[in-house]
């Protein structure tokens, strides 16, 4: 009987030891599983954050693409409107020839008006007439100082650096407005010349009549 009790106690103690070992193993495995779960949760949260960042970047790219598409459509519409306006303007000009004629006539008138030559007034200087018959000596004596000056002056001085020669079309014409003193002087000279010419005719007439 006692022997049976001893066997029972031995078996119970063995079972208790096995149960303690199994509890420790379960606790250890539970802790390990919990740590793995936390690591998995952290990795999943990091992946979710990265996915959210990628989604935000994709949204930004999509918004930019939509904006560029809208701008391209606006430019395309403007180009179409400009082309339609130009085509309409060209067709209107082709259908209405009076517009082209009006513009061409205006252009021709402007060209003609721009190339109109300036009004040239010829200067009518008094012409030197030959001395009258019998007054040649008097004219020579009167012009004596001028001839003497020309003879004493000798050869005319030469240019060291002569100015450039101008062509005839490069020389500007002399334009005198009406009522200027020069034109009045020329008119006075013409009147004086006519008077002298008439007086000389009268004198010659009287000389012919006198014996």
Image: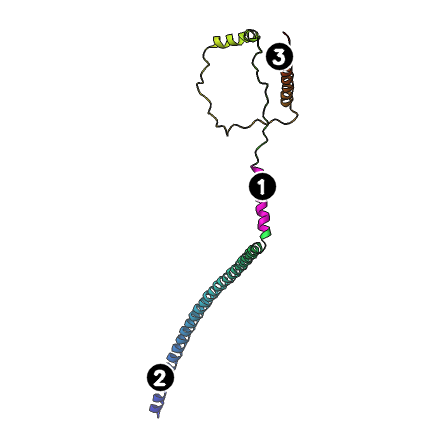
Lateral position of residue 50 relative to residue 140, left or right: left
- Considering every residue shown, the one lying at the far bottom of the view is 1
Q: Element at badge 2?
A: helix
Residue 113 in the image: state x and y as whole percent: 58, 38
Residue 149 in the image: state x and y as whole percent: 51, 9
Q: Nearer the viewer, residue 39 or 78?
A: 78
Task: Identify the image quadrant of residue 124.
Answer: top right
Name the residue located 57 percent from the left edge and 38 percent from the top edge.
114
Look at the magenta stretch and give its main secondary structure: helix
Residue 193 in the image: state x and y as whole percent: 62, 17
Work out how far the residue at label 2 is from the one at label 3, CA to CA, in angstroms.
184 Å
Name the residue located 58 percent from the left edge and 49 percent from the top edge.
101
Does the segment drawn in magenta span residue 108?
yes
Q: Element at badge 1?
A: helix
Q: Which residue is mark 2?
A: 14
Q: Which residue is mark 1?
A: 110
Task: Specify few, some or many for label 3: CA neighbours under 10 Å numbering under 14, 14-19, or 20 or more.
Answer: some
Q: Nearer the viewer, residue 19 or 95?
A: 95
Q: Which residues are magenta?
A: 99-115
Q: Which residue is mark 3?
A: 204
Label located before the other in sequence (3 or 1):
1
Task: Identify the image quadrant of residue 208.
Answer: top right
């Amino acid at each position: 009987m006692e022997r049976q009790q001893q066997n029972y106690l031995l078996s119970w103690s063995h079972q208790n030891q096995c149960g303690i070992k199994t509890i420790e193993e379960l606790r250890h495995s539970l802790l390990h599983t919990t740590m793995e779960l936390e690591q998995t949760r952290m990795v999943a949260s990091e992946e979710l954050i990265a996915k959210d960042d990628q989604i935000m970047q994709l949204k930004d790219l999509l918004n930019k693409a939509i904006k560029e598409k809208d701008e391209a459509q606006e430019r395309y519409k403007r180009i179409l409107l400009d082309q339609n306006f130009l085509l309409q303007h060209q067709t209107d000009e082709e259908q209405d020839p009076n517009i082209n004629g009006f513009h061409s006539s205006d252009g021709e008138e402007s060209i003609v008006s721009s190339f109109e030559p300036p009004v040239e007034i010829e200067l009518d200087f008094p012409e030197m007439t030959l001395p009258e018959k019998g007054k040649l000596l008097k004219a020579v004596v009167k012009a004596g100082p001028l001839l003497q000056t020309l003879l004493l002056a000798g050869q005319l001085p030469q240019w060291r650096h002569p100015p450039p020669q101008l062509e005839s079309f490069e020389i500007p014409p002399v334009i005198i407005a009406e009522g200027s003193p020069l034109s009045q002087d020329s008119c006075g000279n013409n009147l004086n010349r006519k008077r002298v010419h008439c007086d000389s005719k009268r004198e010659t007439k009287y000389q012919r009549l006198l014996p």
